[in-house]
Image: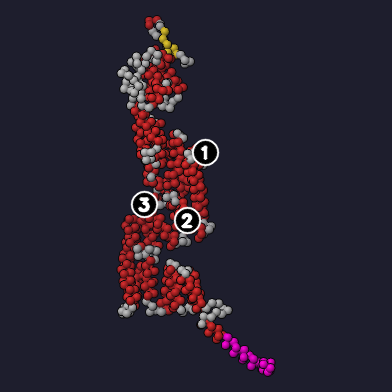
Amino acid sequence: MLFGKRISRSKLLAVLLILSLHTVALTNVLADQGVGTERGPTVAELKREGDTFVRAGKYADAGRSYSQALELDPQSFNLQYLLATTHLQQGKHSQALSSFSKLLELKPDFIQAHLQKAKILSKEGSFEAAKAEVQDFLKGVKGKAGGDPKLGKDREDATELLGSLNSAIGHLKAARKAISGKAYQKAVDEATKALAAGPNSIELREIRIKGYEGVGDLEGMIGDLSRLTHLQPSIQAHGVLLAQLNYFLQHDPQTASDYLRQCLRFDPESKPCKQLHKFIRKTEKDLTKAKNLADGERWRDVLKIVVGTGADSEGLLTRYESELTKVAPKLPPAFHAMARSQLRLQLHSLACKAYVKGNNINGMKKHCPVVASLTEIGGDNDEWAFVGLGEIAMKEERWEEAVRHFRNAFEKGGRNSQDILNRLQKAERTLKVSKQKDYYKVLGVSRDADTKTIKKAFRKAAKANHPDVGGSEEKMAAINEAYKVLSDPELRTRYDNGDDPNDPMGGQGGPGGGFQGHPGGFGGGGAFHQFFQSQGGAGGHQQFFFRDGF
């Protein structure tokens, strides 16, 4: 029954078919009018959505909206143009090229697409392809620019671009030739000129990187490698090398870690990036501790961290140099990793100063000369390295060299370190003494010998040089003179400060100088009579014996 009347089956089917056709027609009309249906947003809605995103600067979202609209209407010239411009805004040059090519398929007389493609291809370093697109544009623009100011301006831009491309093509050829011939500076210069037209050219960046390596320009190489990480984000080696250069040579842990995090975002399981990132974190943690201890003048604790506490305790310096030794072969040999490692310099400098403060000559010998030798990275400006060299020279009795090192240290420290000044003045006094009588040498003892050692040396020298055993009175007098000064703390201090008590011109002597009443500087109560006492013998021969327990 339909409205109270019986109808046949065939008529019912006909009615249902008519209703279905009306529904389809209504849906199409609504879609054309921008009205949503249960099948999803319409072309018009997606376009409006994309336009809203563009106004908000959300070009990635706009691109997605335009792409969805193009799926519904793939022949839309307007949508294809909008999608191309959003790709350009995001720097997605390959996608933009594809969109402009589709624009030309849809509308071959849209010659501005040729110019846009030429600009993109030029930036990518595809100079020959860019040149062909410019020429296509210039062919198409002939006779069209008369009444169109915009088209006239585009023709001027195209003519200028064509000249730039011709120049870039020549520079690229010259750069290739130079790098193959190992003319590194020439390669750098030619690649730089070509990059003005093609800043995203991977080939030109790689040529210039090799050139920078050849001329030893670390900063230039890092700059181009950094650019390559953006142009080729999937190539892990770029980020690892950048991290190594920044950390092991320049000691820039923040920048190195940034490159490693970028690597790990692309590949969270990257073994090289994970291992290096872990090593940097551990090293920087220990370095911070050592620096804080140094600020607090806790030099013994500094050494525990930097050099370790014994054969079984590996210090930070050893761990770092071990890793640097592994990394160095992977770095450009022109940069001499061991000689240009800033962190290696810092660690040796910390150890050198700590040993100077602890008066440990052996420690100074291991580290201070290393610091001073790293001249390429400023080691020869480290005042404590030269203090250490001065102390080593003092220990080895190279007085003039010691004075030179201490004076150098004092100047490099800004002439405001009382500690270094004291060391310099001591070296100057010692140098002055060395040009006078050397009492330490007479007794055969070092300058830091204690009282017991000096007494023992005197006894030995006196036995060997006494006139009764074949020695000379002059030699014995010199031994007595030396012992008299060195056995008396006050006189020894004067002597060590450059004032020889036996010098007639010394500060304490009268007209006769020194100790009065004896040609050797001593009276009858001198050192000789403290240790020997004579008794008469047959024929006037004298005998001597020791006193004071000797």
- Quarter of the figure that contains the N terminus: bottom right
Which label number is shown at residue 395?
none
Q: Quadrant of residue 182?
A: bottom left
State whether residue 507 appears in this view. Answer: yes
Pointer 3 local density, CA inside 10 Å: few below 14, some 14–19, many at least 20: some
Residue 296 rendering spot, x and y as whole percentages: 48, 40
x 53%, y 84%: residue: 29
Determine whether the residue tagged by mark 2 lies in a helix, strand or loop.
helix
| Residue picked out by circle 3 | 216
Which-is-in-front pick, marks 1 and 3? 1
| Residue picked out by circle 2 | 258
Say what amino acid the circle numbered 1 marks.
Thr
Nearer to us in this view, 187 or 453? 453
Determine whether the residue tagged by mark 3 lies in a helix, strand or loop.
loop
x 51%, y 80%: residue: 34
As for residue 20 lying within the magenta part, the answer is: yes
Magenta stretch in the rendered image? 1-23
